[in-house]
């Protein structure tokens, strides 16, 4: 009896394996639209310069942020995709050097729409790695100086960050989990550096805030 059950299980396993092997992957095709929703960690990597004219020993440092991200990819061919990434992230800005004791000196929101051209290596497979390169334009809004910075500078202070334009690189992989659903893992590097004005009364101080983040993403996607 036990031998019969073992043979039946073995035959069932072999049949399942043959069935899986015979089931074709849901291949990418020209005209497909991929929509992904990711959770992303945005980790700045670039150092900032001093604050001129009188605080050269001080600098500003944007802190990491975790937020959702939505992106859309249009497959121009079976291998080439055009991806538009939409997200907005909130970042605290900490003081370093001569103003390091102030900890948080400001905050800002960043809106960095990014357009990438991708190459999908194995569009016929259920596991599809890709790489991409493109351009990023970052808009800063909602900037605010902290009360500790205002106290240190002697009065109400306005913080302004200029917009930034730069290049972006990407690598990732999609993994099918259904006919149209797939999982996604993605990493990007974005060239991003912003000029900052710190205005207190009639005094304007200037600094360069280097951000250039590495963006780690995990999420789910759907193919239309």
Image (cartoon, rainbow, N blue to C red):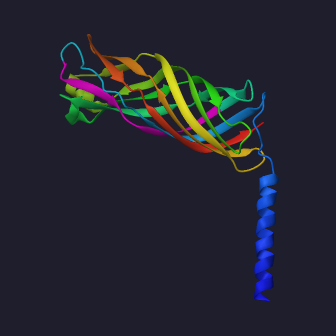
Please provide percent x and percent y for residue 42. 46, 36
Question: Would you identify the image quadrant in which residue 160 lies?
Answer: top left
Q: Give the range drawn in magenta.
A: 55-71
Please provide percent x and percent y for residue 181. 72, 46
Q: Is residue 13 above or below residue 116?
A: below
Residue lying furthest top in this view?
A: 202
Please provide percent x and percent y for residue 100. 22, 33
Compared across the picture, whether 96 is left or right of 136 comes to: left
Compared across the picture, whether 169 is left or right of 91 comes to: right
Magenta span includes 26: no
Compared across the picture, whether 163 is left or right of 170 comes to: left
Query: Residue, x 27% and y 20% (percent of image)?
Result: 49
> Main SS of the magenta segment?
strand
Query: Residue, x 64% and y 28% (percent of image)?
Result: 119
Q: Which of 213 and 150 is in front in this view?
A: 213
Q: Is residue 63 above or below residue 47?
A: below
Query: Residue, x 20% and y 27% (percent of image)?
Result: 152
Question: Would you identify the image quadrant in which residue 120 lies?
Answer: top right
Considering the image in quadrants, where does the C terminus appear?
A: top right
Please provide percent x and percent y for residue 2. 76, 87
Considering the image in quadrants, where does the N terminus appear?
A: bottom right
Magenta span includes 70: yes
Q: Nearer the viewer, residue 128 or 99?
A: 128
Compared across the picture, whether 216 is left or right of 36 comes to: left
């Amino acid at each position: 009896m036990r031998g019969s059950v073992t043979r039946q299980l073995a035959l069932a396993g072999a049949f399942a394996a043959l069935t899986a092997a015979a089931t074709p992957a849901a291949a990418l095709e020209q005209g497909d639209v991929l929509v992904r929703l990711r959770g992303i960690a945005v980790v700045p990597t670039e150092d900032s310069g001093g604050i001129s004219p009188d605080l050269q020993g001080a600098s500003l440092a944007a802190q990491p942020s975790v937020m959702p991200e939505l992106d859309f990819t249009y497959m121009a061919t079976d291998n080439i995709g055009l991806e538009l990434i939409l997200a907005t992230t909130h970042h605290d800005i900490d003081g370093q050097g001569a103003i390091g004791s102030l900890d948080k000196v400001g905050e800002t929101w960043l809106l960095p729409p990014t357009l990438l051209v991708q190459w999908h290596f194995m569009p016929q497979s259920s596991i599809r790695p890709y790489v991409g390169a493109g351009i990023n334009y970052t808009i800063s809004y909602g900037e605010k100086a902290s009360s500790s910075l205002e106290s240190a500078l002697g009065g109400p202070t306005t913080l302004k960050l200029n917009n930034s334009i730069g290049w972006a690189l990407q690598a990732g992989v999609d993994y099918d989990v259904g006919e149209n659903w797939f999982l996604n893992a993605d990493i990007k590097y974005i060239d991003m550096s912003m000029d900052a004005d710190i205005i207190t009364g009639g005094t304007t101080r200037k600094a360069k805030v280097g951000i250039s983040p590495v963006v780690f993403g995990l999420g789910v996607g759907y193919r239309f």
